[in-house]
Image (spheres, rainbow, N blue to C red):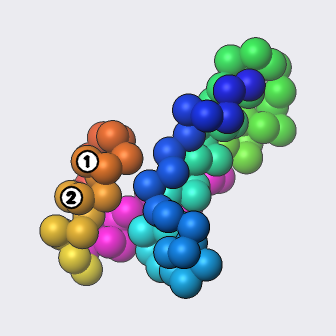
């Protein structure tokens, strides 16, 4: 598994200050999703990891939809920064 391909968008100082921020949570979920996706490419029948991936995807989707409702500009910036698709709901 390659760990260097994950996004380190937030610096170390900001990590310690903003752990509860919406952006930080979405970025950490995105890193977990990418890690699990690369794991599942090797282990296709790991159904527990597939379930965990679906749960994390749902959590990230709920946070993204909340952010899109509250602050559209921050949502657009975060989507482009993480290089993920915009949700169909928004």
Q: What secondary structure is marked by label 2?
A: helix
Q: Quadrant of residue 33?
A: top right
The N terminus sits in image quarter:
top right
In the depicted structure, whether residue 34 falls above or below residue 24: above
The C terminus sits in image quarter:
bottom left
Mark 2 surroundings: few (<14), some (14-19) or many (≥20) residues within 10 A: few
Q: Which mark is residue 80?
A: 1
Q: Which mark is residue 76?
A: 2
Residue at 58%, 58% (x, y): give it: 28
Foreground of the two, 73 or 49? 73
Q: Where does residue 27 sit, x and y in percent of width and height?
A: 49, 57
Residue at 54%, 75% (x, y): give it: 13
Question: Is 44 left, or right, of 60 in this rendering?
Answer: right
Q: Where does residue 57 sit, x and y in percent of width and height?
A: 55, 49
Foreground of the two, 33 or 48? 33
Question: Is 48 left, or right, of 4 in this rendering?
Answer: right
Look at the magenta stretch and give its main secondary structure.
helix
Q: Where does residue 78 sit, x and y in percent of width and height?
A: 31, 58
- Whether residue 48 is visible to the viewer of this picture, yes or no, is yes
- Whether residue 54 is visible to the viewer of this picture, yes or no, is no
Q: Which residues are magenta?
A: 55-69
Residue at 44%, 55% (x, y): give it: 9
Cβ–Cβ below 8 Å for labels 2 and 1? yes
Q: Quadrant of residue 50?
A: top right
Foreground of the two, 21 or 50? 21
Q: Where does residue 72 sit, x and y in percent of width and height?
A: 18, 69
Mark 1 surroundings: few (<14), some (14-19) or many (≥20) residues within 10 A: few
């Amino acid at each position: 598994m390659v760990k260097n391909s994950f996004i380190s968008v937030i610096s170390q100082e900001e990590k310690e200050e903003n752990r509860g921020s919406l952006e930080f949570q979405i970025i950490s979920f995105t890193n977990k999703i990418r890690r699990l996706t690369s794991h599942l490419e090797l282990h296709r029948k790991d159904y527990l990891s597939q379930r965990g991936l679906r749960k994390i995807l749902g959590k990230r989707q709920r946070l993204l939809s909340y952010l899109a409702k509250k602050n559209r500009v921050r949502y657009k910036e975060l989507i482009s920064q993480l290089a993920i698709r915009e949700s169909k709901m928004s």
